[in-house]
Amino acid sequence: MSIADLKALRSSLDDAPYAGLTGRFHSHLTVATHELDRLRGFCSTNRIKLTVVDLDDAEGRVQRDVMTTRYHKDDAPGAVGRIADDLLDLGARLGGAGFLVLRAKLEHESEPSLEPYGPGRYHEVHIKLAIPADGYDTERAWLVENGRPHGFVASSNPRERTGDTVVQFVNLRIYEGDRSAADARVDEVLAVLGARGLDVVEVKRETTVFDTHHALDRWWA
């Protein structure tokens, strides 16, 4: 369904507001599979990054997102259309290998980001934390419990940990307002994390250009 949706969307990507959008992007194809090792092999052969993210919240909802990740740098008009063509090609290859693609998503990393934000063009923030392994369970439970009141959700990559440190993410989506309002929201979350004494390693922000299956993980934001 996702690839068909992207094909339907493709013709509009050569027009405003997409036509002049250039710079840094990254794209994802979300895949439904229980054959993670086989998908990892496909990605390795095709030199594509595989991203696995576990999401959960205080209401007991749990979701694992398995997706390809590609980074793009294109400063010429028509960049969005070219990236969409690249995604359509990758989606076809995944389908040929027996994998079902659930969603195609493109995000814009460059400044200034697209705004104002809305349901179809939301701003996404990923705050990377480094948590000592010996206190990780306590801090993870705190993040899950306090996420909803403060508008964020905890996520983690099951492979991204060392002997004494666990990489943990706090994520939020912003569906309205402009960059200044988004800055204020991010500052509020960072203040909450700082008051808890958590170590913020990195803050990544991007704005969705298109998302063919927003309902897939809409529950967490």
Image: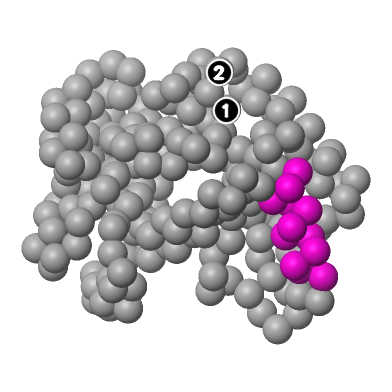
Q: Is residue 20 visible?
A: yes
Query: Which of the numbered marks, if any, corresponds to residue 176?
Result: 2
Q: Residue at x 54, y 40 (%)?
A: 220
| Residue pointed to by mark 1 | 174
Task: Give the structural element (helix, strand or loop) at label 1.
Answer: strand
Point out the stretch of residues depicted in magenta.
135-146
Q: Could you tell me what secondary structure mostly forms the magenta stretch?
A: helix
Q: Position of residue 14 (x, y in %)?
A: 20, 24
Three-letter amino acid code at disc 2? Glu
Query: Which of the numbered marks, if any, corresponds to residue 121?
Result: none
Q: Position of residue 104 (x, y in %)?
A: 29, 43
The picture quadrant where one finds residue 85 is top left
Q: Nearer the viewer, residue 166 or 204?
A: 166
Three-letter amino acid code at disc 1? Ile
Q: Residue at x 62, y 22 (%)?
A: 179
| In the image, residue 139 above or below residue 151 | below
| In the image, residue 15 above or below residue 84 | above
State the quadrant of the N terminus.
Answer: top left
Colour approach in the figure: one colour
Tell me whether circle 2 and circle 1 mark residues in contact (CB < 8 Å).
Answer: yes
Q: Which residue lies most toward the front here?
A: 60
